[in-house]
Amino acid sequence: MNGDMIGRVIKGRYKLIDERGRGSFATVYIVRDLGDNRIYALKVMHLELSGDGELLARFQREAHILLNLSDSHIVQIFDYGNDNNMHYIVMDYIDGQSLKYYMINQGPMEPIRAINYARQITEGLDTAYKQGVVHRDIKPQNILINSKDIIKITDFGLARGRDTVTLTQSNVFMGTAYYISPEQAESGRLADTRSDLYSVATVLFEMLTGRPPYEGDTAVDIVIKHINEKVPSICRLRPDLPLEMDAFMQRALAKSPDERFATPQEFNAALERLTQQLPPPRPVSPGEINKAPAPPPAKEARIVVISSGQSIPLKGDKMVVGRQDPTLGIYPEINLADKTVGRRHAYLRNQQGVYTVEDLNALNKTRLNGVTLTPHEERTLKDGDILRFGSVEVRFELR
């Protein structure tokens, strides 16, 4: 499913008016309810995956779990169903951006703001905890911030309830490497609320420092560090933080779940104590109250072909990377004249200054910093990233 879905009406009611985001097995659209004229977000499972029983069960499980979770910090579900083998979930439309967007564009946050976001995430997880639900994929991409600065947790596709039956062995490794707890990396079945809280702590670490606690060249490298390496000192990376922040992180990121905060309420109580250790915010002078901050200079994006030095500016919102074929009438926005590059190899997207790459199930695959991308899963790009389309290696620059 792609742009040709725009304008379609699902179940005779939900008209697709724009694409909001695309993942490895579903796409989220902005839709208008023709019945009451309201705007919603509608997640549609990729049609070609609807025959996969496990993925379909995962999609349906998200709908069932969200129906039973009512919290101001969890995205609300309104409807779900199946229209001509298109499985969909209708959710609250959030007017805002993901936490990842702010982390990329604004860098390390002020401690008060970062802790406030972490507390809101944990309050949402407390509702899930009381219903016996474990999210298992807490990461900045799954945290939305609306126009009123309120956190909304989304994407419960990997979640498990207390009555959920484990589907298959593929549950052994779930979540995202940067934010996954040691026990979840070793066996997804062991994940409980303490695993979710571990992930919240990694997100808080990144909000404060601009980098996750563990990094590596591959997902396996990062997971091994979660399991074996000591918790890095956050105060060394950010000396303006109180020493109590180091003690908090050492407990929140402990290797053993038994050594961590046991419940979301306990985690939030510790965050409250941390807030009391922070210096008060700088007073604002009367002249600053109505003074709008100067907008940051716009950054320009490009890719540079490493072998030739050719520089290709990235101008559009959605650009196809591929190989031109006049016979078939194929003219990609970014033409890489190499036989190992597919005619429609990948997408490069610009969403308000945040650039992403998506492999289009190309024969020779797309790689990001040496890691082969899962087809149709968007990955965020940062300045200096190395992309490989077939045999063509390029450097992404955003300056």
Image (cartoon, rainbow, N blue to C red):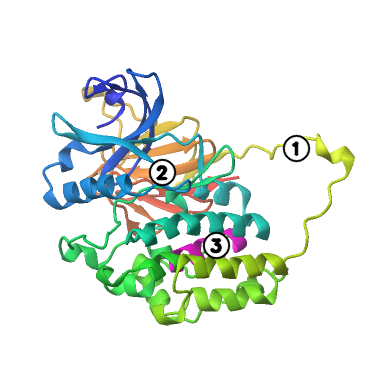
Q: Is residue 71 above or below residue 223?
A: above
Q: Is residue 321 above or below residue 134?
A: above
Question: Residues under labels 2 and 3: Cα distance?
Answer: 20 Å
Query: Where does the image place residue 54, in percent across and percent down from the top left?
Result: 15, 53
What amino acid does circle 2 point to? Answer: Val
The quadrant where residue 130 appears: bottom left
Question: Residues under labels 2 and 1: Cα distance?
Answer: 33 Å
User: Label 2's element?
Assistant: loop
Magenta segment, prevailing SS (helix, strand or loop): helix
From the viewer's perspective, tell me whether residue 329 is left or right of residue 218: left
The quadrant where residue 273 appears: bottom right
Q: Which residue is mark 2?
A: 75
Q: Which mark is residue 204?
A: 3
What amino acid does circle 3 point to? Answer: Leu
Q: Point out the image quarter for the C terminus.
A: top right
Q: Which mark is residue 294?
A: 1
Instruction: Work out whether residue 96 can be spotted.
Output: yes
What amino acid does circle 1 point to? Answer: Ala
Residue situated in front as seen by the camera: 313 or 134: 134
Point out the stretch of residues depicted in magenta.
198-209
Q: Is residue 333 above or below residue 255?
A: above
What residue is at 33 percent from the left and 74 percent from the top? 183
The quadrant where residue 11 appears: top left
